[in-house]
Image (cartoon, grey):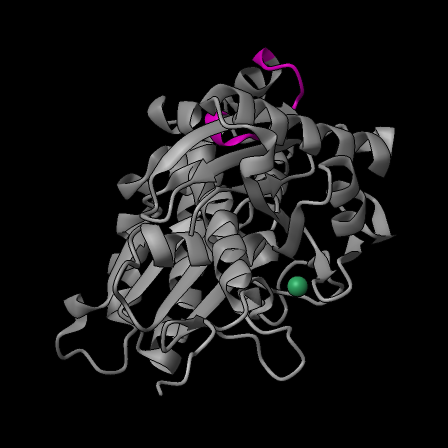
Amino acid sequence: MRGLIIGVDLGGTKMHAAAVDENGALLHDEREKTLPEEGPDAVIGRIADLCRRINLALGVPHSELRAVCIGVPGGVDDAAGMVDKAPNLKWEKVPLAHLLSSSLGGVKVFLDNDVRVAVLGEHAYGCGRGTRTMVGIFVGTGIGGGVVVDGKIHMGQRGVAGELGHMVVKPKGPRCPCGKRGCIEALASRTSMERDVREMIAAGHKSSVIKIMKKGDRVRLTSSVIAKALAKEDPVMTKVVKRAQHHLAVAVSNVANLLDPEVIVIGGGIAERLGEDFVAPIREAAYERLLVQRDRERLRIVATELKENAAPMGAAFVARQRLAQLQPPPVRVASA
Ligand SMILES: [Zn+2]
């Protein structure tokens, strides 16, 4: 298929767009702040700018841009081109596909969920290449996931499958943003790690985490703060991360016992930064919990290969796939 395909990861803080060719090579990428407080029109204008910048950088005329797919942090209705609800952006019922398409001169725009496209990115171009069954768990502000079965993303009958973040691993555990208790998101997301760090420090445990946090522009437990505190062997950070890894291992083993996948990829900011250091303890503890121990190493539990490119590359993959589905079948000429 000729022409340029762009995938966009639309986050609450920043957006990241990438042009990817049919072999999965990243041709060029661009980033921009999202600034959702300026409203949907301003955000959509910035997405359009990113696409134009990519065209320009690659020296490709705008007419060659074939399709764009946006990975949205929330629920989408792709058929209607609508973002149903994206809490991080404070969007509800935003006709994103239509608005972006208009500002890009009628280019085809597809929508999907950001975690789902990241899982598809790893499946198509990353650590899941060539596998039939794969699971992705993305640890960030929250915890998202996706399941690939027989080479396709498993949507479920209502299209809501893959919510691994809300698997309950501790029924009387802390409250989750979803309202329930003890979801893995409430135990191992970056937000819950920050809560645990603050609680331990308030209880009198010595830690340099707050000092490291204050060096940044905001007092927040970012992946980089976690990495720095672990490198300094900060006792509070070490304990909090170990606890999160334990809970992730429980979740991973539950998923593995259910699906027996070939690969479970752990992504998101912390896994991108710490890689194998973050994943190795999760893998070891998860292996111990597998019901069937035979050939357990055949289950690969690995850190993200594409890192922050997983979502934009996956979105580009989805755009290419959906575009191909729209193409009319080749005209058959009956032989005489
Ligand atoms: Zn939950």
Judge left or right: residue 150 versus residue 240. Answer: left
Q: Residue at x 38, y 29 (%)?
A: 230
Residue that sits furthest to the front in the current view: 336
Q: Quadrant of residue 186?
A: bottom right
Q: Nearer the viewer, residue 308 or 298?
A: 308
User: Residue 163 location, x and y as percent?
Assistant: 58, 67
Q: Quadrant of ligand 1?
A: bottom right
Can the viewer see residue 196?
no
Q: Position of residue 325 (x, y in %)?
A: 53, 68
Residue 156 is covered by the magenta coloring: no
Q: Which residues are magenta?
A: 215-224
Q: Which residue corresponds to the image point at 77% horizontal and 30% vertical from the top-left?
A: 45
- In the image, taking residue 224 as reference, residue 67 lies left or right, namely right
Q: List the single residue furthest toward the bottom.
A: 336
* Residue drawn at point x = 18 percent, y = 78 percent: 293
> Which part of the image, by quadrant, shows the C terminus?
bottom left
